Image (spheres, rainbow, N blue to C red):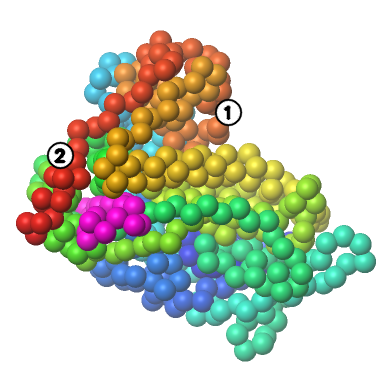
Amino acid sequence: MSHIIVLGGSFAGLLSGMQLARAGHDVIVLERESHAAIAPPADAPAAPRAGAPHAVHGHALLARAAAEIRRTLPDAYAALLAAGVGELDLVHDMPGAIADRAARAGDDDLVMLTSRRHTLDRVMVEVAQATPHLDLRAGVAATGLGLALERSGPPRVTGVRIVGGEALPADVVIDASGRRTQVPRWLAAEGIQLPLEAWDCGLVYFTRHYRVRAGAVRPPLNRVFSAGGLLPSLVMGWFPGDNGTAMLAQTVLAEDPLLKSVRRAECFDAVARTVPSVAPWLDSSDPITGVFGMGALQNTLRRIVQDGRALVLGLHQVGDAACTTNPTLGRGLSFAAASAARAAHVLASEPDDPSAQALLLDAGVGRELEPRFRENARYDHALVELLRADLAGQPLPDSPPFADDVLRPDELLRAGMADPDLYRASMRYTQLLSDAAVLSDASLIEQVRRLVPPGTHLPRIAAPTRADLARTLADV
């Protein structure tokens, strides 16, 4: 078996480390932050973290991530539930307009996990610490990679250098160090340029955490697993968390001076109360944190293979180190779980062929991550166009009409609001259990067309206007 070093001891790195250690590899997980930073006590409120500033924002484990953890790390799944992480059964909670509620094959996979990020990380650290063959080293920063130049072919990673100059040897290095990964910079210094595609989101995120009062009547989630929606001026989403908590996220245009005032707690709550699907939740809850902000975000896609050839051997990327997408769609943790499971599977199937490992993992990137990355970039572009039109007082752009030969995710979701099979197809797609090929499935398109004719535009939800929000904020 191999000696493996995982860079990053947060969610993606811990999942990777545990799966590889349980396959018999000797694994070291290096995390530059302390255990106290990544795994605070259960009763500690969410707080900003230098190595993962996004950790205080809204998180959820889509059904794909929940299924991967349940399949590969059942004890970790049980530990999450024991720690108060919630299960959200998407079939049990399907829209009331669907009359046929009989079970279908595959329903067991349509379960999300609801939790704050620091609870997820704390439980994963505790399970990782009890995992044989896994050495979790917190407070240890990597400073570079060891590389061996080959007579022919790409160089091969031989290990990791850490602060103080010590070199740790490894057969394989997994980069799970997140969106701020330094690995591409280290390789560039050696003349190896990894392909990078990046698109600015143009958005700023603000999040506040709440605790739902014991015994309070819980309002419905109007968007299946969240409450809120896309308003003309901003995006708002209320997400259930663990242990009776919830996270409210407000996404605004980066150049919007009016709505960036929601960084102030009183403005944040005042704007939230103007949204009918969110206001009842605020009436049933109490804030337990201030407002956290996050901006300067990009959708990024990094690869180690170019033109069918690995640029470096023995190095693999998982989680945000491979692909970062706009958090509005909540895919980050699920991408991490999927890529960690894929890496463990490929290393098991091709233990002695680093080139085959790289090509197989890159094929998975092309099949699963790249289409979602491009979908996110298109979503961001359309969202920014809408928010900028509202900011400028211009007519809001219509959503593009539905095409004849391919479904849009929002079209499939709309059709699924009244049909049990289309609902499941929509949930499987949005929850990353099926890939983009489902949107071109001829039989599915035919079913959707009976409910949503071509050329249809989705109606906008009833929501406060910018003038309404300006008046609300003026009174704060």
Give the CA distance from mark 2 to mark 1. 36 Å
Q: Please report the residue visible at 45 percent of the width from the left and 58 percent of the height from the top.
A: 297
Amino acid under disc 2: Pro
Can residue 23 be seen at all in this image of the molecule?
no
As drawn, the residue found furthest toward the bottom would be 164
**252 is within the stretch colored magenta:** yes
Q: Please report the residue visible at 61 percent of the width from the left and 63 percent of the height from the top.
A: 175
Q: What range of the chain is rendered magenta?
A: 241-262
- Residue 249 in the figure: left or right of residue 106: left
Q: Please report the residue visible at 26 percent of the width from the left and 68 percent of the height from the top.
A: 45
- Residue 232 location (% of width, % of height): 27, 40
- Residue 470 in the figure: left or right of residue 161: left
Amino acid under disc 1: Ala
Quarter of image, res 35 = bottom left
Q: Please report the residue visible at 56 percent of the width from the left and 54 percent of the height from the top.
A: 198
- Do tag 2 and tag 1 residues touch (Cβ < 8 Å)? no
**175 is within the stretch colored magenta:** no
Q: Which residue is mark 2?
A: 276
Q: Secondary structure at mark 2?
A: loop
Q: Secondary structure at mark 1?
A: helix
As drawn, the residue found furthest toward the top would be 450
Upstream in the sequence, badge 2 or badge 1?
2
- Residue 128 location (% of width, % of height): 50, 65
Count of numbered circles in the view: 2
- Residue 409 in the figure: left or right of residue 160: left
Q: Which residue is mark 1?
A: 437
Q: Is residue 336 above or below residue 89?
A: below
Q: Is residue 11 above or below residue 373?
A: below
